[in-house]
Image (cartoon, rainbow, N blue to C red):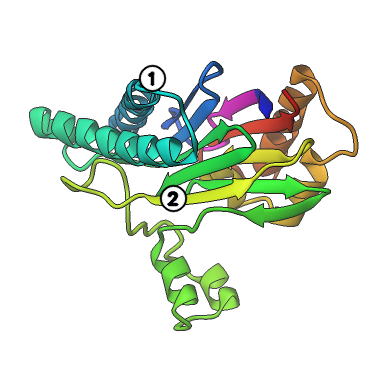
Amino acid sequence: MTVLAAAQTDIGCVRGNNEDSFGGDAEHQIYVVCDGMGGVAGGEVASAIAVEEFLKAFGVAVTTGDADAETSKSALFHAAIAANRAVYDRALLEPHHRGMGATLVAAHVIGERLMVVNVGDSRAYLFREGEPTQLTLDHTFLSEQVRRGLMTQAMADESPMQSVITRAIGIEESVEPDLFGVDLEQGDLVLLASDGLTRYVTDEEIAQMVSSSELAGPQELVVRCEKLIELAKERGGADNITCILLQSAAA
């Protein structure tokens, strides 16, 4: 399986700078989105470091031998750990960036398998025949309360604690990434997105805007990303908005 990829990012309607970063490596079919936090450019620095170090560490791990799903899983895990350490160490060296961090979500296509890693509340989705499936779990206070049965989703949606994250890259010396895997079929679409998109656009709306019965070319994937961003901005766009859209096809 191979993938076509498109990415777009936008500052949104309120922020003065873009603290989101993204990157990818088409050769290794690895793509990553990071949403920074920290203020006074700290978030911008953290997300950029996280993307750079993640891709660097992943590239080293997958060139040590023939890649398979287990190799991918290990590489994603260690790349997230490397990104965490790099951001944490930079904050120690630069007191004005103390406390900066970032969320991270990344996807790797290996054969007919999609492997995903995440830390924080940036998400990965799979869209198959128009149906959305969120692959990642949000590392937020509200999401964890809902999963534990201590709060309903309706209560969480009305809570003022939407931005309370329980895990992030670079905040602590160590971090625990989550890993997920799923088989891919031709025509599947995968979306990596910062919460600047998912706070404003529902899963069903995203599915309607990105899904199609026909395989899209690279430019069409860009257009779909742009439409998602525009809808988030129409609804307020108080945060930066970033998305990477991948489409699977037979090699």
Q: Which residues are magenta?
A: 6-14
Residue 10 in magenta? yes
Disc 1 designates what residue? 63
Residue 147 in magenta? no
- Helix, strand or loop for disc 1: loop
Q: Is residue 202 left or right of residue 168?
A: right
The residue at 75%/34% (across/down) is: 227
Q: Earlier in the sequence, mark 1 or mark 2?
A: 1
Query: Which circle, 1 or 2, is nearer the viewer?
Result: 1
Residue 173 higher or lower than 246, as above or below? below
Disc 2 designates what residue? 179
Residue 232: quadrant of the picture = top right
Q: CA distance from mark 1 to mark 2?
A: 20 Å
Q: Position of residue 193 (x, y in %)?
A: 56, 40
Give neighbour class at mark 2: few <14, some 14-19, many 20+ (Cα, 10 Å). Answer: many
The residue at 39%/23% (across/down) is: 65
Residue 6: quadrant of the picture = top right
Q: Residue furthest right?
A: 213
